[in-house]
Amino acid sequence: MKKLLVLSLAVLLFAAFSSAAFAGDKKVKLAYVEWDCATATTNVIKAVLEERMGVECEIIPVAAAVMWQGVASGDVDGMATAWLPVTHADYLKRLKKDVVNLGPIMSGARLGWAVPSYVTAESIADLNKYADKFDGKIIGIDPGAGLMMRSEEAIDKYGLDKFELMEGSGATMTAALGDAIKNNEWIVVTAWSPHWMFGRWDIKYLDDPKKVLGESETINTVVRKGLDKDMPKVYAFLDKFAWKDANQMQMVMAWNQEKGADPYENAKRFIKENKELVDSWLK
């Protein structure tokens, strides 16, 4: 039932923005989920397109299922936040004939459940015996995210019948984590890296002996079929775009956490301070 509701929500969201945000002009349209890593990446791509290539770019925040469907249908030109081979495996398997995977923009990414370092639990397998300390809750992010689907599987495979996966967003998850740490309380959150929270707080991943949440992953750019013919220069840039390392992305993510931060202005700052890297994307 939950999967049916998520799918229905995705269909409704897609119908809602397909007639408005996707009205047929020739600007580049990129979809993304409002995760901090995706926000940083997508704004940097937008900044290069607009500031260096003179191409108008619209970036559209949506749910993960809608993002993939938008690329597959051609209503958006692409996205640069496909977590593979595990997190978004179901989306790619279902839609691969309608999309083009341009490959990784970063390697060494991972998913997991994280806790403050003062929490004595070390493994997902041990959580049931600490359920009361965690108030029986695993603090999640947006419904439909690959991490949430894997987390539901983890609850099942580890027999965590004393826990409930709480839906929310990346912002509500980090806010709950920050509040818990401030009060020295126990909390377990759905997490991923690279992410600025690992630099701000002393937190650790719980061991995942069954590997339900996967191991090392890559973040990939995926575009619609035909983009190479319709917008060859844009396609060539997206094909070459990649972060030099995780520290670059986390730096931009940290800038975006500053009070009053504007992700697009920070993206412009990044491309200005890293001209040699940006030039390599445009050769």
Image (cartoon, helix red, strand yellow):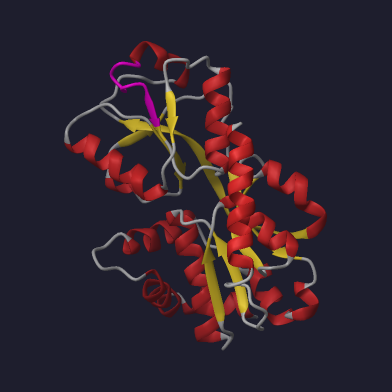
Q: Can residue 214 be seen in this view?
A: no
Q: Can residue 283 be seen in this view?
A: yes
**Residue depicted at x 45% and y 59%:** 249
Q: Where 74 sits versus 170, above or below?
A: below
In the picture provided, is 230 more to the left or to the right than 60? right
In the picture provided, is 10 more to the left or to the right than 148? right
Q: Residue furthest left?
A: 183
Q: Where 117 sits versus 64, above or below?
A: above
- Viewer-proximal residue among 153 and 20: 20
Counting from the top left corner in percent of width and height, residue 266 is at 37, 72
- Viewer-proximal residue among 187 and 105: 187
Q: Residue furthest top?
A: 129
144 part of magenta stretch: no
136 part of magenta stretch: yes
**Residue depicted at x 52% and y 14%:** 159
Q: Quadrant of the N terminus?
A: top right
Counting from the top left corner in percent of width and height, residue 220 is at 63, 56
- Viewer-proximal residue among 221 and 241: 221
Counting from the top left corner in percent of width and height, residue 11 is at 64, 52
Residue range highlighted in magenta: 131-138
Q: Main SS of the magenta segment? A: loop
**Residue depicted at x 52% and y 22%:** 155
Q: Where 177 sits versus 137, above or below?
A: below
**Residue depicted at x 54% and y 58%:** 62
Q: In which quarter of the image is the C terminus?
A: bottom right
Q: Where 53 sits versus 251, above or below?
A: below
Q: Residue furthest right?
A: 97
Question: How many marks are shown on the rendered structure?
Answer: 0
Counting from the top left corner in percent of width and height, residue 184 is at 19, 30
Q: Residue furthest bottom?
A: 54
